[in-house]
Image (cartoon, helix red, strand yellow):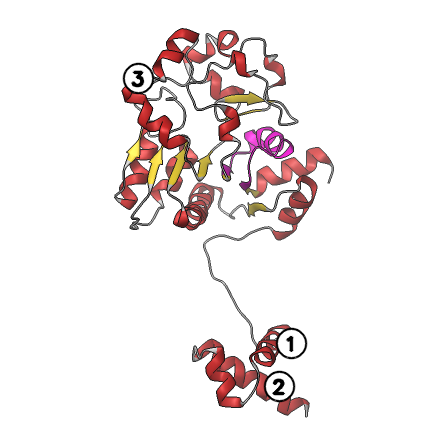
Amino acid sequence: MDAEHNQLLATLAQDYYLSKMAISDISKKYHLSRYLIMKYLDEALASGIVSINIHTDYDRNAKLERTLQQHFKIKNLIVIKDPTNPQDRDQVIATFAANQVQSLIRDCQTVGLTWGETIYAMLDHFNKQTASQLTFTQFMGENMRYHSSAASMRMVQKAAAKYDVPYQTIPGPLYIINDQARTALYQEPAFTAAFTAARRMDIIICGLGTRQSINSIPAWAENTDRIFPGVDLSKIAGVAFGRPYDLHGRFLVSPENDKTLSIPLDQIMRVPRRLAIVQRKSKFQAARGALEGKLFTDMILTESVALRITDALGI
């Protein structure tokens, strides 16, 4: 009886997985209910009669994912195992992130992008696709790396070219200390299209910054106290959406002191999907703070970043 049952499971599995027969057709062929066929297919998997192998250029650390998901109460968190060859890390994370992001934006109309080498590398691995109603937009000002591949405008241009769709840019610096000048720019025609698009964003794709990121731009490093008035700089764990936050994920700049040329922070936090990609160990505190504060709905981490977070938390 067991042998006959196992043969039935194997036969059903061959029809379903190899012959690509529909469940309805299998039901007619063997005079079995759809419920019973699905039950037998599940049994074939559980018993080892059917084995499914997924071949990819990356591998995920399911144990670390579960640990962090449970601790931070975040459902959409992915940990990519570090490759054996460290030189392959950037390509591995960029390839996975590209596939994940393109899957997420399939049903989106407006996608917000920030900057960074990780984001740029991800866009390099985007496949050419078509979209009828899709726009890529900046939602905050430039990072002033105008001669770098990590420049903000290049991100939306590069993404839009992969889909042959429009993009919107904000041709101004991320931080404007003069409140009157910054307020006036929101009314300028060169800015209004991007800010209008940004208020309709379905998803944001970004990296995380650190205090070192701020210090890497001379104009910012020399004016940090004026850019972040009243902020204890020693408490900065990371920077998201241009704003610094602490290890608990609390933004350190009050709305009245916000010098960021951007849509308001409360509007950003209402965007349905907010995805951060973090690959460098030096940013583990930034990732930890962002997770603590639930600044993102989705996060992709390298294994080395995830391990540093769990080590710091003792979990």
Task: Count residues near mark 3 (Cα–Cα under 10 Å), then give few for <14, some for 14-19, many for 20+.
Answer: few
Mark-to-mark CA distance, 2 and 3: 71 Å
**Can residue 258 be seen?**
yes
Q: Is residue 176 above or below residue 10?
A: above
Disc 2: which residue? 6
Asked if residue 281 lies in the magenta stretch, the reply is: yes
Q: What range of the chain is rendered magenta?
A: 274-300
Are circles 2 and 3 on residues that touch, CB within 8 Å?
A: no
Are circles 1 and 3 on residues that touch, CB within 8 Å?
A: no
* Quadrant in the picture for residue 171: top left
Callout 2 amino acid? Asn
Residue 24 is situated, as x and y percent measured from the top left of the image, at 48, 80
Give the structural element (helix, strand or loop) at label 3: loop
Dot 2 or dot 3: first in sequence order is: 2
Disc 1: which residue? 47
Q: Is residue 272 left or right of residue 237?
A: left
Residue 265 is situated, as x and y percent measured from the top left of the image, at 51, 25
Residue 241 is situated, as x and y percent measured from the top left of the image, at 48, 26
Asked if residue 57 lies in the magenta stretch, the reply is: no
Residue 22, which numbered label? none
Callout 1 amino acid? Ser
Q: Is residue 223 above or below residue 108?
A: above
Residue at 49 percent of width and 52 percent of height: 58
Callout 3 amino acid? Glu
Disc 3: which residue? 188
Which is nearer the eye, 288 or 251?
251
Give the structural element (helix, strand or loop) at label 2: helix
